[in-house]
Image: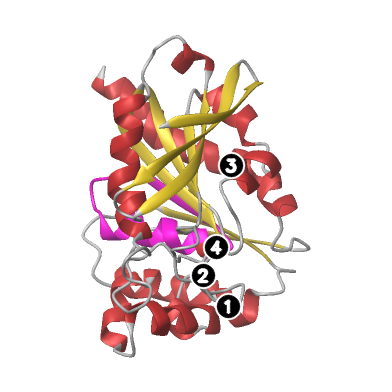
Amino acid sequence: MERIEHHASFGGRQEVWKHTSSALGGETRFGIYLPEAALRGERCPVLYWLSGLTCTEQNFITKAGAQEHAARHGFIVVAPDTSPRGDAVANDAAYDLGQGAGFYLDATQAPWAPHFRMQDYVARELPALVEQHFPATDARGIFGHSMGGHGALVTALRHPGRYRSVSAFSPIVAPSQVPWGQKAFTAYLGDNRAAWAAWDAVELVKTAKERLTLLVDQGEADEFLATQLRPELLAAACEATGHPLTLRRHAGYDHSYYFIATFLADHFAHHAKALVGSEKARS
């Protein structure tokens, strides 16, 4: 690995690293915030943030104001890129497919399958790397925005026991039922809709064996609310199965990082209940 950025922030340090990923078949980057305790070598819980369409590892670390919250709670915060990148990686001219639009799944179709294995990277390779090279505990939480909110919900639901908390801003909760998801799933997974269910949070809650509370914040002025996000589908699925969900809808807020920054402290508090409490119980 090679560190390519480092900035002092709230007593800790915001860094960006690049490395060669076996899951993605090439070089990738991730941002990592190390609170003061981690800089002293103390082991800290880790929050993984997954960003949305067109984003890189930079959007969250420069726009959300997460460092202040991470410093207060003593969390390491990791923000990977949203897809594999590079000249040898398949791409599409559209913003919602290809590079910048990995959808946090493992593609099975050509030309995407060799590199588009973001689920393998996010759920397996990246945590192993973080826990090997940084003072991180195995207490993990995951959250994200839009496509990344989809990724956070799906990753937690697919891997019971691996994460202790999950939350999302403006997530694509039912990609099988909306244009963004249908386009991506057809390209990455093929036409067999039965295969799509494994990557759809609304479908996954129907058979979930673990009952982590899902915290979801959604702006009512979000331009994508009615066509792409449809949180009411997740609410209905959770009500039908008894899966715990806290869905908060906020008048006047849109799809932007202004919305994320406004309610980010609540998400850190949500994760702290599970991550900090579990660490105290283990000590």
Q: Earlier in the sequence, mark 2 or mark 3?
A: 2
Question: Can residue 164 be seen in this snapshot?
Answer: no
Q: How crowded is mark 3: few (under 14 residues within 10 Å), some or many (20 or more)?
A: some
The reply to whether discs 2 and 4 touch (Cβ–Cβ < 8 Å) is: no
Q: How crowded is mark 4: few (under 14 residues within 10 Å), some or many (20 or more)?
A: many
Q: Residue flagged by tag 3: what amino acid is it?
A: Asp
Measure the alpha-carbon separation of dots 3 and 1.
Answer: 24 Å
Residue highlighted by disc 1 = 228
Residue highlighted by disc 3 = 266
The reply to whether discs 1 and 4 touch (Cβ–Cβ < 8 Å) is: no
User: Which residue sits at x=45%, y=76%?
Assistant: 174
User: Which residue sits at x=70%, y=68%?
Assistant: 220
Measure the alpha-carbon separation of dots 2 and 3.
Answer: 20 Å
Residue highlighted by disc 4 = 100
Q: Earlier in the sequence, mark 3 or mark 4?
A: 4
Residues in magenta, as a range? 148-171
Q: In front here: 223 or 231?
A: 223
Question: Can residue 53 be seen in this snapshot?
Answer: yes
User: Which residue sits at x=35%, y=56%?
Assistant: 24
